[in-house]
Image (cartoon, rainbow, N blue to C red):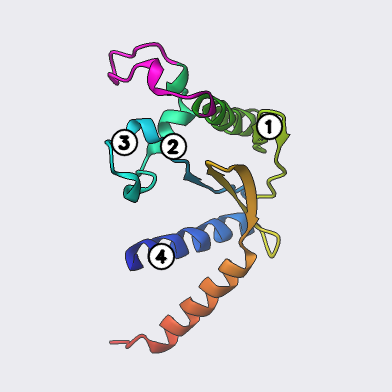
């Protein structure tokens, strides 16, 4: 868990630095439980690394893909709705520079990274929503200050 927390802190700080440099920065976390893709009794694994790519590239809409070996009947209507939402996030960002997530009729206002109002998009089985993470950034800065103070310089 510690390696993950260090990686996430670095990700937050990098995103903030890019936003402060004038870039449009948006972050999301994909915690969607695609149960039909996992072996039985593996719910403890949570969402696997890169599972979001299947949804970003529309795998739930593909017909029996020879590339993946995944048949369309392994996807639920909710899987397809989530995939459509993820494809919409990427396509609106590419088209306008601002992603506009929408799950069915439910639209989400996503502020992106920048200051106290920074938000991250959360995609999970409950739907799509944003969460503020300005407090997390503040904590990351405090932690980095502590690390810098305790670092032994050679």
Residue 30 at x, y = what percent? 48, 44
For marks 1 and 4, give the CA distance.
Answer: 32 Å
| Tag shown at residue 38 | 3
Residue 74 falls inside the magenta stretch: yes
Q: Earlier in the sequence, mark 3 or mark 4?
A: 4
Q: Which residue is mark 2?
A: 52
Indicate which label's residue lies in the foreground, 2 or 3: 3
Q: First in sequence: mark 3 or mark 1?
A: 3
Please identify the quarter of the rendering in which residue 8 is found: bottom left
The location of residue 135, given as percent across then percent down, is: 62, 69
Report, in whole angstroms, how far the alpha carbon at label 2 lies from the one at label 1: 22 Å
| Label disc, if present, on residue 8 of the rendered structure | none
Relative horizontal placement of residue 126, taking residue 102 as reference (left or right)? left
Mark-to-mark CA distance, 3 and 4:
25 Å
Is 138 on the left or on the right of 45, as rendered?
A: right
Residue assigned mark 4 = 5
Q: Main secondary structure of the magenta part?
A: loop
Magenta-drawn segment: 62-78
Quadrant where the image shows the N terminus: bottom left
**Quarter location, residue 132:** bottom right
Give the distance between the C-alpha atoms of the residues marked 3 and 1, in whole angstroms: 35 Å
- The mark closer to the camera, 3 or 1, is 3
Mark 2 is surrounded, within 10 Å at the Cα level, by few (under 14), some (14 to 19) or many (20 or more) other residues, namely many
Q: Residue at x 47, y 41 (%)?
A: 32
Question: Which numbered disc flags the more N-terminal residue, 2 or 1?
Answer: 2
Sequence-earlier tag: 2 or 3: 3
Do residues under tags 3 and 4 come within 8 Å of each other at their CB atoms?
no
């Amino acid at each position: 868990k510690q390696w993950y927390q260090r990686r996430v802190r670095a990700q937050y700080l990098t995103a903030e630095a890019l936003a402060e440099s004038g870039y449009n920065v948006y972050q999301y976390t994909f915690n969607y439980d695609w149960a039909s893709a996992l072996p039985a009794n593996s719910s403890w694994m949570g969402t696997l690394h890169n599972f979001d790519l299947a949804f970003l590239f529309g795998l739930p809409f593909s017909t029996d893909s020879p590339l993946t070996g995944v048949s369309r009947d392994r996807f639920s209507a909710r899987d397809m709705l989530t995939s459509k939402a993820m494809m919409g996030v990427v396509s609106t960002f590419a088209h306008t520079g601002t992603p506009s997530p929408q799950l069915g009729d439910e639209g989400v206002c996503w502020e992106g990274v920048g200051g106290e109002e920074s938000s991250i998009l959360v995609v999970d089985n409950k739907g799509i929503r944003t969460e503020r993470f300005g407090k997390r950034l503040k904590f990351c800065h405090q932690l980095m200050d502590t690390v810098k103070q305790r670092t032994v310089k050679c």
